[in-house]
Image (cartoon, rainbow, N blue to C red):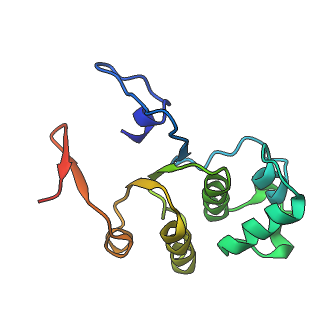
Amino acid sequence: MLDLIAGQLTPSAGSVFIAGGVRLGYLDQLSNLVHPDQSLLDAYIHGREGPREELINELFHLGFFRADELQTRVGSLSLGQRRKLQVARLIGQRANVLLLDEPTNHLSLDLVESLEQALSEFQGTILAASHDRWFIDRFGGEVWELEDGRLGPRM
C-alpha cells in the first residue's frame, strides 16, 4: 500500500491521488540509498540548500549520529545506520507526509527511542506500517488494519 501511495507501484485498478502541497517522504524497507561511496554527511545534505554548518547542526539535533561518524561511507553503514540516515533525510527535506514502512526494522532499542523522539517532533502526517507492537503502542495515533483486502480502523 505504501509503495502505491509513494508512486513506486502502479495500481492494478483505480488510482492514487496526492493532494497539492503534499511533500511525501518515503522510508522503504530496503534502506536503499543512491550513492554508497558518499560520506554520511554528504548523503544527508545532498540536494539541500543552506549553510553547511546549519545542516550539520540540524542532523545533530535529531540525535542519530555523532561527529566521528559523519565521514563514514554510506556503503559501509549498517542497516540500522542506513535507516537512521533515511529518516534524517526525510525530516530534513521538509516532507510534510511521512510514509514509513517498518521504521523500527534493524534498529536497536536506543535508536528506536531516538526515532520516536524525532517523529514526536515532526509537524506533519505520518503513515507507518509496522508489526512492532511496542512502537505502535508508544507512538500512539490511530491504528488501522489491512485484512482480507480491506483497510479500516482496528476494532
Q: Position of residue 132 (x, y in %)?
A: 36, 66
Q: Position of residue 64 (x, y in %)?
A: 67, 71
Q: Is residue 74 above or below residue 25?
A: below
Q: Residue 56 vs residue 26: left or right? A: right
In the picture as drawn, the residue positioned furthest to the bottom comes out as 110
In the picture as drawn, the residue positioned furthest to the front comes out as 21
Q: Is residue 17 above or below residue 131?
A: above
Q: Position of residue 138 (x, y in %)?
A: 36, 76
Classify residue 84 by image quadrant.
Answer: bottom right
**Residue drawn at point x = 67 percent, y = 56 percent:** 92
In the picture as drawn, the residue positioned furthest to the left comes out as 155
**Is residue 66 or residue 54 the one in the foreground?**
54
**Residue drawn at point x = 65 percent, y = 60 percent:** 88
Q: Residue 63 vs residue 153: left or right? A: right
In the picture as drawn, the residue positioned furthest to the top comes out as 13
Quadrant into which the C terminus falls: bottom left
